[in-house]
């Protein structure tokens, strides 16, 4: 949803509005996203522990690793950009804002692709387990 709707919206509005919208979204996303990632990682790890079948465990371990990767991309790459945006004066935005926005969008697309791969593995594991 963010890659398909929010990023194009950011690109279509004036720079100060983009930063204002990004800050607002961050305020709400930061409340829920870390919790949901940790819950997914712990739930996946619990499933790895509960299941002994090799193919199922392999899929679950890979899904958990990909979910950790999503969290690392978020925490180490996107979040620092977000935190930087929160310090900017809306009347004096950095001259390289477009490059910063595009870097954030590329990193977001990467984490989206990784999260889709994790979801596919979780779904495959559920089908394989007969859930």
Image (spheres, grey):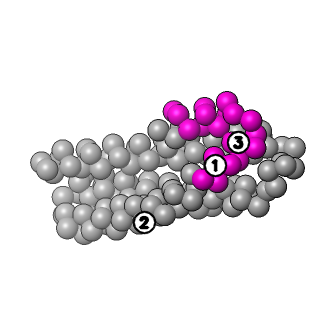
At 47% across and 38% down in the image, what residue appears? 1
Residue bearing the label numbered 1: 22
What whole-number distance in Å separates the C-alpha atoms at marks 3 and 2? 28 Å
- Location of residue 122 in the rendering, given as x and y in whole percent from the top left corner: 29, 50
Residue at image position (87%, 50%) is 92
As drawn, which residue projects farthest toward the left? 130
Q: Which residue is mark 2?
A: 35
The image's mark for residue 17 is 3
Give the residue drawn at x 40%, y 61%: 36
Q: Which residues are magenta?
A: 4-24
Q: Residues within 10 Å of mark 2 (few under 14, many from 20)?
A: few
Picture layout, residue 46 above or below residue 71? below
Q: Quadrant of residue 60?
A: bottom left
Mark 3 falls on what kind of element? helix
Query: x, y percentage for residue 16?
Result: 75, 44
Q: Secondary structure at mark 1?
A: helix
Q: Position of residue 4 (x, y in %)?
A: 51, 33
Q: Residues within 10 Å of mark 3 (few under 14, many from 20)?
A: few
């Amino acid at each position: 949803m963010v890659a398909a709707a929010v990023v194009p919206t950011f690109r279509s509005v004036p720079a100060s509005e983009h930063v204002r919208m990004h800050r607002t979204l961050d305020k709400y996303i930061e409340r829920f996203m870390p919790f949901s990632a940790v819950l997914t990682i712990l739930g996946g790890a619990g499933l790895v522990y509960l299941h002994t079948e090799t193919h199922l465990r392999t899929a679950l371990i890979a899904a958990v690793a990909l979910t950790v990767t999503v969290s690392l991309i978020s925490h180490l790459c996107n979040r620092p950009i977000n935190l930087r945006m929160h310090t900017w004066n809306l009347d004096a935005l950095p001259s390289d804002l477009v490059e910063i926005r595009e870097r954030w969008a590329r990193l977001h697309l990467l984490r989206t692709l990784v999260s889709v791969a994790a979801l596919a593995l979780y779904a495959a594991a559920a089908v394989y387990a007969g859930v």
